[in-house]
Image (spheres, rainbow, N blue to C red):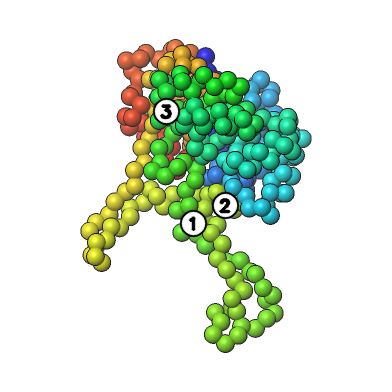
Amino acid sequence: MPALLAPAGSLGAVSAALDAGADAVYVGLAGWSRGGARRELTGNELAVAQRRVASAGRELQVALNTIPKAVERARLFEQIAALRDRGIRSVIVNDVGILTDLKRRFPDLGLTASIGCGAQTVSDVAFFRDLGADAVVLPGTVSPEEMREIRTVRGIRVEIMIHMVEEFVLLGKCWMPSYVHLQPTVFGKASEPPGAGDPPDGGRSGLRLTGSMKRGGVGACFRICQQPWELYDSGRLRGTRLFPSRQISRRADVAAYAEAGVDVLKLQGRSLPEELLAPLVRSYREAIDGRTAPAAEQAWSAPLPAAWAVVGR
């Protein structure tokens, strides 16, 4: 049967996921992971989490799924070395270039191509295998029938994000949050006076798009895609609209995915508090173990219980 990989956004959530039956837990490293500080663990917290997971005989994976600039990569590689010193051997990355760099620098590191890498087909999975990825995550929109064909690719573990939000953009590659959080950045010397016609700061300060959840170590998602957007026609307001954002749960297909050869069933939801995460993980644990009656299962596209919604990830 496939392994169950659960999310955790805090130390309490790590313990809750383990107690609920997760075979492995993934967390974000503070400053280098999608979601912001409320859903990430510091280095010291990671050390505690690793001890808890290892003592339970499970695995801890760390998401390093921002896309750092060239000048930020050296700091990222330092973080990888620190993770290995703590006994962590599996990381999730969101960028092809970072994946290949890490494979070359840390050949013993287990690398997973995140769902944000966009793999959905046989060719995609073979591509990431050939790059050196040990595992690849596919979205829950890939059916068990499609998965049977994909599993003909050998030499790489295949994960399915069986519980997730389907976004209208490529998951993990959105730039929209950049528009709502701009942070001043000093480029010149503060002692230089502004010249005639210059902006008040002499043009020394720029605005870095720190709102984007994928821009280096400053990423944070402000979820503006989930807010009403105003629709104008020839200057006249016609109304407001919401972008598509469907909650997906494919619990009813757990057995079919297992038969198709999926290695890992992955759950989205590092934003969930531990009291809501535990029943979610337990539900999928029961489905994997065959303890949930098929008649009681929801269709994969049906609305989820409110407590299990993962809007905002």
Q: Residue at x 42, y 37 (%)?
A: 165
Q: As rendered, which of 80 and 270 lies closer to the eye?
A: 80
Q: Is residue 193 left or right of residue 237?
A: right
Residue at mark 3: 142
Local SS, label 2: loop
User: Local crowd at mark 3 within 10 Å, few (<14), some, or many (≥20)?
Assistant: some
Crowding at mark 2 (Cα within 10 Å: few <14, some 14-19, many 20+): many
How far is disc 1 from disc 3 in space, using C-alphas? 29 Å
* Amino acid type, callout 3: Val
Residue 21, given in percent of the width and then of the height, sits at 54, 21
Viewer-side label of 3, 2 = 3
Q: CA distance from mark 1 to mark 2?
A: 9 Å
The quadrant holding residue 233 is bottom left
- C-alpha distance separating marks 3 and 2: 28 Å
Instruction: Name the residue rendered at 36%, 37% in the picture.
Output: 246
| Marked residue nearer the N-terminal end (3 or 2) | 3
Looking at the image, tell me whether mark 1 or mark 3 is earlier in sequence order: 3
Identify the residue shown where x is 24% and y is 65%. Answer: 234
Placement of 174 over or under 231, stated as above or below = above
Per the image, the residue denoted by label 1 is 178
Three-letter amino acid code at the position of disc 2? Arg
Evaluate whether residue 166 shows in this view: yes
Name the amino acid type tagged 1.
Ser
Residue, disc 2? 215
Task: Give the SS element for disc 1.
Answer: helix
1 or 3: mark nearer the eye: 3
In the rendered image, residue 158, in percent from the top left (x then y), is placed at: 54, 25
Question: Any mark on residue 11, and which?
Answer: none
Frontmost residue, 76 versus 154: 154
Q: Position of residue 175 (x, y in %)?
A: 48, 52
Which percent across, then down, holds residue 41? 62, 41
Which residue is at a point 68% across and 81% down the rendered structure image?
Answer: 192
